[in-house]
Image: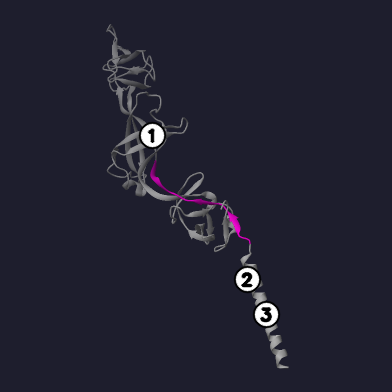
């Protein structure tokens, strides 16, 4: 009787052992998900101060007649280049019985006629500006910076201006920084200068975008599809010894295809595809291994 009892007990133990082994075998044979990864790299990212501004001539002067009278002729027009002392207009005196030689109005500097402020037949006096001339060999950019950026701009820095219509980029040198902020805008006005060989790239009165590179910061690039959000925190899945591990990151900047982040190390294997179907701690197989 006792022998039958021990035999039954042994059978039960064998069955329990076999069940446990079956469960272990089942766990060990769960199919691991196949993933793609990218080994991330550290890059240097320029820190830009974006500035919107306007282009001005380096020098602008108005031309006045030296006598009172009537505009007899206008010899130049807007856009004409003039040299110093070039005749621009003539003025005749309207005095009864007078027969004076018409007074010649001449350019006071070499430059470009920006505006004609009179017309033939108009009566003018010595306080009436009739032309505006600008020296366009060198141009000025004037714009404003705000907030913490006001502490980052320095004389001698390069301001890069970009013309969206032509994709041209030009480097200008910051020559002046206002000692006080604007009472209305709160911005700090800066000026930058460029001297051009050709004068058909920038134009006085042109509004244009610019930026100053104030420094560089280090970051890791990851594909945009690698990033996911969990509980309001950005992160990625890393693969370590074929296990997917969630790792939080902080976004620094971005491009069209990449996020620039910190919180990772160069060489980390970041999962690039299927991140939303993976669980933290899940076993994975890297495609190609």
Prevailing secondary structure class for the magenta stretch in the rendered image: strand
Contact between labelled residues 3 and 1, with CB atoms less than 8 Å apart: no
Relative vertical location of residue 78 with respect to residue 38 in this rendering, above or below:
above
Q: Residues within 10 Å of mark 2 (few under 14, many from 20)?
A: few
Residue 14 badge: 3
Disc 3 versus disc 2: nearer the observer: 3
Looking at the rendering, which quadrant does residue 29 occupy?
Answer: bottom right
Q: Earlier in the sequence, mark 2 or mark 1?
A: 2
Relative vertical location of residue 13 with respect to residue 92 in this rendering, above or below:
below
List the residue tagged with mark 1. 54
Q: Is residue 153 left or right of residue 9?
A: left
Secondary structure of residue under mark 1: strand
Q: Is residue 126 left or right of residue 35?
A: left
Which quarter of the rendered picture does the N terminus lie within? bottom right
Q: Report the span colored magenta.
A: 31-50
Secondary structure of residue under mark 2: helix
Q: Earlier in the sequence, mark 1 or mark 3?
A: 3
Nearer to us in this view, 10 or 147: 10
Q: Earlier in the sequence, mark 3 or mark 2?
A: 3
Residue 149, horizontal then vertical, whole percent: 35, 47
Q: Residues within 10 Å of mark 3 (few under 14, many from 20)?
A: few
Relative vertical location of residue 195 with respect to residue 255 in this rendering, above or below:
above
């Amino acid at each position: 009787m006792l022998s039958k009892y021990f035999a039954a007990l042994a059978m039960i133990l064998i069955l329990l052992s076999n069940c446990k082994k079956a469960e272990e075998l089942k766990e060990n044979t769960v199919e691991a998900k196949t993933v793609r990864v990218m080994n991330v790299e550290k890059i240097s990212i320029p820190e830009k101060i974006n500035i919107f501004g306007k282009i001005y001539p380096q020098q602008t002067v108005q031309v006045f007649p030296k006598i009172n009278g009537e505009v007899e002729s206008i010899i130049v027009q807007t856009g004409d280049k003039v040299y110093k002392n070039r005749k621009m207009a003539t003025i005749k005196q309207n005095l009864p019985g007078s027969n004076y030689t018409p007074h010649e109005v001449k350019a006071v500097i070499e430059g470009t006629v920006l505006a004609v402020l009179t017309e033939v037949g108009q009566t003018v006096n010595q306080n009436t500006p009739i032309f505006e001339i600008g020296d366009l060999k060198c141009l000025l950019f004037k714009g404003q910076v705000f907030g913490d950026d006001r502490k980052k701009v320095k004389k001698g820095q390069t301001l890069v201006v970009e013309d969206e219509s032509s994709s041209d980029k030009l480097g200008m040198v910051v020559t002046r920084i206002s000692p006080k902020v604007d009472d209305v805008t709160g911005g700090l006005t800066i000026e930058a200068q460029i001297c051009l060989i050709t004068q058909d790239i920038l134009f006085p009165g042109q509004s244009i975008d610019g930026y100053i590179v104030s420094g560089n910061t280090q970051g890791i690039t990851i594909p945009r599809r690698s990033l996911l959000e969990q509980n309001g925190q950005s992160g990625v899945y890393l693969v370590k010894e074929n296990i997917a591990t969630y790792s939080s990151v902080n976004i620094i900047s971005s491009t069209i295809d990449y996020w620039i982040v910190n919180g990772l190390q160069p060489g980390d294997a970041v999962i690039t595809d299927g991140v939303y179907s993976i669980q933290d701690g899940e076993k994975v197989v890297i495609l190609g291994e």
